[in-house]
Image (tube, rainbow, N blue to C red):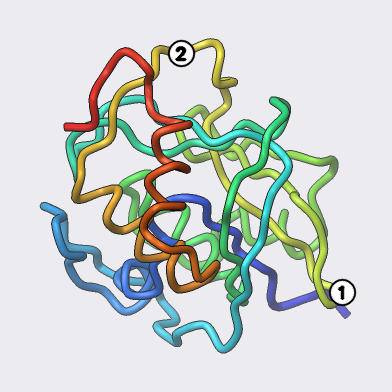
């Protein structure tokens, strides 16, 4: 029997449960200029847990939603990345990914079949976009743990400073999932933000 669920692993603003809720149920996150349509299945996750991924977090690009850089994950560069895994249906995962790429949810999305039968390797390219590279980062309770990121590595693109409103969503998720205090959160961001650019 093919699986119906997986663990969506977020290392960015979706670590905040209410932020992810806007992708699923629709709405506008605090500090954001964008309202999300939501997923076809608006059920909120029934389980989640803290995760520490092998690999590095970095900030790059320019967000139309937040302004400033956004978080990406480089699975191949040594380091540790704090994250949060949510139990979602495969369809919900695909709908979240599509909204990240500013696309509408569609029935029978081809990516759903890819995920049901299993990624052919450790990663799968669903397209050239910045969150269309799906990476398998582990397994939990017999289900795959997947995240999405950019096709490029952290050393191949300029790094850009994130905005405070965006970091506030990441910080909310770190407090919820990892129970970190403000000092540890600030140290985590400072170690990963561009050294020559202040957080603006």
Q: Which residue is mark 1?
A: 142
Residue at (72%, 60%) from the top-left corner? Answer: 145
- Reply above or below: 199 against 112: above
Task: Check disc 2: other Cα within 10 Å, few if <14, some if 14-19, many if 20+.
Answer: few
In the structure shown, which secondary structural element does the residue marked by tag 2 occupy? loop
Q: Quadrant of the C terminus?
A: top left
Residue at (70%, 39%) from the top-left corner? Answer: 124
Q: Which residue is mark 2?
A: 157
Residue at (58%, 72%) from the top-left corner? Answer: 86
Q: Which mark is residue 169?
A: none
In the structure shown, which secondary structural element does the residue marked by tag 1 occupy? loop
| Displayed quadrant of residue 190 | top left
* Left/right of residue 195 with respect to residue 87 in the rendered view: left
* Left/right of residue 159 with respect to residue 118 in the rendered view: left
Percent across and percent down for residue 115 are 71, 59
Seen from the viewer's position, the closer of residues 21 and 129 is 21
Disc on the earlier residue, 2 or 1: 1
């Amino acid at each position: 029997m093919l699986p119906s669920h997986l663990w969506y692993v977020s290392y960015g603003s979706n670590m905040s449960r209410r932020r992810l809720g806007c992708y699923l149920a629709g709405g506008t996150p605090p500090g954001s200029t964008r309202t999300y349509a939501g997923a076809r299945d608006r059920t909120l996750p029934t389980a989640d847990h803290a995760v520490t991924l092998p690999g590095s977090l970095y900030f790059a690009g320019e967000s139309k939603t937040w302004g400033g850089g956004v978080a990406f994950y480089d699975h191949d560069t040594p380091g540790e990345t704090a994250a949060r895994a949510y139990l979602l249906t495969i369809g919900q995962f695909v709908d979240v990914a599509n909204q990240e790429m500013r696309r509408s949810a569609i029935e029978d999305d081809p990516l759903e079949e890819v995920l049901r039968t299993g990624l052919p390797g450790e990663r799968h390219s669903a397209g050239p976009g910045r969150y269309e590279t799906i990476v398998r980062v582990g397994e939990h309770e017999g289900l795959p743990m997947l995240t999405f990121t950019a096709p490029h590595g952290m050393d191949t693109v300029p790094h850009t400073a994130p905005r405070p409103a965006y970091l506030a969503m990441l910080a909310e998720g770190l407090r919820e999932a990892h129970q970190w205090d403000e000092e540890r959160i600030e140290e985590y961001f400072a170690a990963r933000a561009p050294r020559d650019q202040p957080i603006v």
